[in-house]
Amino acid sequence: MDAPKAGGNLRKNPKKEKDSHADLIGKWTDQSGQQYWLSAWRNVNPDGSVWFSLKLGAPVESQTGNNFSPKKPAFVQQPSKNAVDMDDDIPFN
């Protein structure tokens, strides 16, 4: 069986609001089948020639929840030293 071919696609970024946001966004798949986010910015040289700056981002799974592991909370409140133990034998009906 042949290894998957690397490739990807880009489309116009519908959420572009600032010049710093990518002009084009999409996904890139490497030869192992792993997908990555892909961003591109359109640039123009003084002579009018156009070129694109590319950024290969994090793997797609880490941002879609497939391999997501929640961050530990920055602060966990500990019980007060004066806390009353509420574990009793009163049934709730």
Image (cartoon, rainbow, N blue to C red):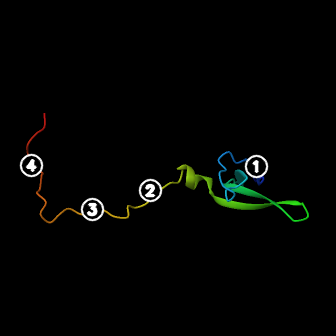
Image position of 11 with respect to 56: above or below: above
Location of residue 54 by image quarter: bottom right
Q: Amino acid at mark 2?
A: Pro
Q: Which mark is residue 70?
A: 2
* N-term-proximal mark, 2 vs 3: 2
| Disc 2 to disc 1, C-alpha distance | 30 Å
Q: Residues within 10 Å of mark 1 (few under 14, many from 20)?
A: few
**Disc 4 target residue:** 88
Location of residue 93 by image quarter: top left
Query: Which residue sits at x=8%, y=42%?
Result: 90
* N-term-proximal mark, 2 vs 4: 2
Q: Residues within 10 Å of mark 3 (few under 14, many from 20)?
A: few
Query: Which residue sits at x=13%, y=37%?
Result: 92
**Disc 1 target residue:** 9
Q: Amino acid at mark 4?
A: Asp
**Mark 4 and mark 1 residues within 8 Å of each other at the beta carbon:** no
**Mark 2 and mark 1 residues within 8 Å of each other at the beta carbon:** no
Q: Which mark is residue 77?
A: 3
Instruction: Compare residues 66 and 15 and report the one nearer the observer.
Output: 15
